Amino acid sequence: MLFGITTPNSAVYSVSLQPNEYNDTDFSLTPTNYSAETSFTNPHALLFYASSLDPTIPYALTVTNEDGAELMIRPGDFQVFAPTFPVS
C-alpha cells in the first residue's frame, strides 16, 4: 500500500507496478493515472494498492508526478504485507 497527502492543489500521478522479471505477461508496462486532488487535505490517503502478487519475486513500483502540481509521499508511507501460512 502506498499512502500520501492529498490536497486541493495535488497532482495527477501515474503508478506502474511490474515484476523485475520483465517477461511476465500478466502485468502491463503501461502506467495507470490517478488524481491526488481532493476538496480537503487528507494527510494519510491511500494512493495505490495491489493484491494477489507473487511473494516469491521482487517488484518495481514507479510513481510519477504527471503535471508538476503537489504530490507528497513521506518516508514510511509505503507498506508491504506478506501472507503468513499456517504451520502444520
Image (cartoon, rainbow, N blue to C red):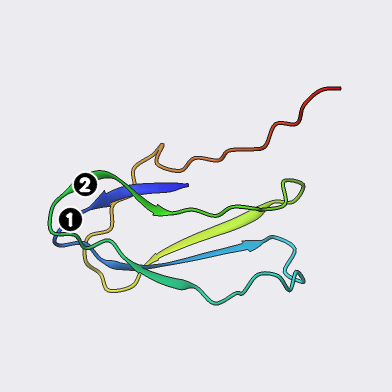
* Depicted 3 relative to depicted 15: above or below: above
Nearest to the observer: residue 20 or residue 2: 2
Percent x, y of residue 13: 35, 67
Marks 2 & 1, CB-CB < 8 Å contact: yes
For badge 2, the amino acid type reads: Asn
- Which residue bears the numbered disc 1? 7
Q: Farthest top residue?
A: 88
Percent x, y of residue 44: 29, 42
Residue neighbourhood size for the residue with mark 2, other residues' Cα within 10 Å, grouped as few (<14), some (14–19), many (≥20): some
Question: Residue at (65%, 53%) from the top-left corner?
Answer: 52
Question: Residue at (60%, 57%) from the top-left corner?
Answer: 60
Q: CA distance from mark 2 to mark 1?
A: 7 Å
Question: Residue at (54%, 58%) from the top-left corner?
Answer: 61
- Which residue bears the numbered disc 2? 42
Q: Secondary structure at mark 1?
A: loop
User: Horizontally, is 29 left or right of 57 in the view?
Assistant: left
Q: Identify the image quadrant of the C terminus.
A: top right
Tell me how many marks there are.
Answer: 2
Whichever of labels 2 and 1 marks the residue nearer the N terminus, that label is 1
For badge 1, the amino acid type reads: Thr
